[in-house]
Amino acid sequence: MADGYATTGIEPAPKPSWMWLQIFRCFQVALDPRKLIVAALGILVMSLGWHLLSKAFYHDAPVKPTLTADAAANTESLRNYDRDMAQWRVLDSLAGPGGAIRSMPWNENRGENPYLFLGRVASMPSAAWFDESWRYFKMQLPVMVEPLQKLLLPIVKLTDPNASPLTRLYLVFVLFWSIAVWAFAGGVITRIAAVQLSGKDRVSITDAVKFVCNRYLSYVLSPTVPVGVIGAVVVGLCLLGFVCLVPVLGDVLYALLMPLVLLGGLIMAILLIGLLGYPLMYSTLSTEGSDTFDALSRSYNYVFQAPWSYAWYWAVAIVYGAIVTFFVVLVCSLTVYLGKWAIVQTPLSERTNQKADYLFISTPESFGWRELLLRGTPLQGHVERVFDEKDKTKSRVEYVYSDRDAAKKYEDDYSWYNEFGAALTTVWLTVVFMIMLGFSYSFFWSAACMIYLLMRNKVDEVDLDEVYLEDDDVPPPPPSPVLNTPPAPIAPPTPEKPSTLPMVTPDVTSVTTPEVKALPPDAPKSPEPPKAPEPPKPAN
């Protein structure tokens, strides 16, 4: 089969007004183990890069200047200190210990554990169930758009007026590292999802990786181009600002050239709003097999031409994703918790003081795992926002023991083999946690692919089952059935006779035979021919 679009006979599409129901297919598609592993690896690689960049760019807080007898100098020094401190706080909130970019994924705060939530709600009056459920799910909704938030966070912080040039350079590196990672991971997930959602056979992970590698530059450039245009506009306006620094003349020029400033701001605003269609860029490349220009034009066109449909599709996907993620996290949490609970029920563990609670001291904090697994132990506690003792404006979210003295006494009894066992247990739990977290990312990219198909159907009137397939993606045709019939006999070959003249087949239909008439019965018979005389016999 040649490269190009391919369609298969699938069930008829629903009515246009109910097309959004197709989003509910994304749950099963997102559960594909291949997508979960790719998403988990993408999260891990992105977070490691962010962590290393944060440590490289982070520095200590500025030192408060010593006051002197010169009041004017003190005022200037304090003013500079306040400015430097405001800039450092922005960097500290991102790259500092517990910062939004420096934190590893298993330590990020993603709300209360589902099992603890259900236990807490079950002990409440039924009249409070709705309010508590709404409060809980309201905290879970941002988890579903985390991939988009990870991209937009450095862009938004770039526009922070208190961000220093060093912080902005750090954010640029963070942004491009995120794009480089998810151009591959997001591309592989959307490629597999596009083939599955269109009704085709499953595409192998090898073919999906090969597909993305052949177009990796387009995946990288799709979100990079609008960001680069925004950067170019900023540079142009900065050059205009240098001209306006000229005394007297600069004020006049600034007023005269204000339309250019507003035009530049409008261009940046449109490009920044259009980045809400960032998930559609990878979906376009994975579905159409096209290039950067097509990915940009389709994503921006769909966002601005049908914004209400785009917003509605994402609203359905986010709410539905939060519900299914709740059950996925609940199942994984119960799996780990019940296994740990069964272990600590070992007889005689209380008397020998060998309960396995210490194995879970470094359990991932996110989704309330550590709080769940350390309940009822000297290490129990909860996650809360902790403020710095010296600078009350600094804070971070961390796990705090309920009884620090009891926890310290418990930890002092550790031996080296206890620490080794806890470290190895943490590795296994982190693997399970990353795959669980990978589901939310897998669902996000699968839903983005489905939303792209819906937007393409609405704007361009293209069927949902049309997807670009390559030769490697098309499965071979099934073998024809073999009939149980004996083979036909093979005629022996006839020897060829050499001949110098061409063989002409006679036309037997043109040959006439003479007509033979029957004789009457009384007709005389024809005389017999005379017999030859017998030779004489020899004499005796």
Image (spheres, rainbow, N blue to C red):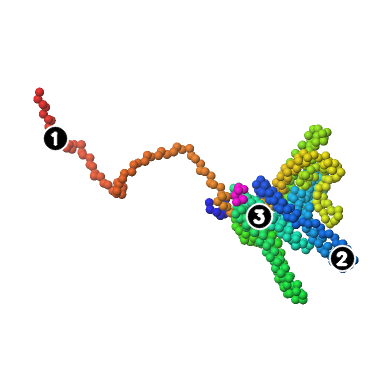
* Disc number for residue 183: 3
| Sequence-earlier tag: 2 or 3 | 2
- Contact between marks 2 and 3 (CB within 8 A): the answer is no
| Sequence-earlier tag: 2 or 1 | 2
Relative depth, front residue between 82 and 308: 82
479 over 243 or under it: above or below: above
Residue at image mark 1: 530
* Disc number for residue 268: none
Q: Residues within 10 Å of mark 3 (few under 14, many from 20)?
A: many
Residue drawn at the location 69% of the way across and 51% of the way down? 45
Relative depth, front residue between 81 and 531: 81
Residue drawn at the location 30% of the way across and 47% of the way down? 499
| Mark 3 or 1: the one toward you | 3
133 over 488 or under it: above or below: below
- Distance of label 3 from label 1 (alpha carbons): 115 Å
SS category of the residue bearing label 2: helix
| Sequence-earlier tag: 3 or 1 | 3
Q: Which residues are magenta?
A: 203-210
Quadrant in which residue 251 is drawn: bottom right
Which quadrant would the C terminus be assigned to in this image? top left
Residue drawn at the location 88% of the way across and 67% of the way down? 70
Relative depth, front residue between 261 and 216: 216
Residue 206: in magenta span: yes
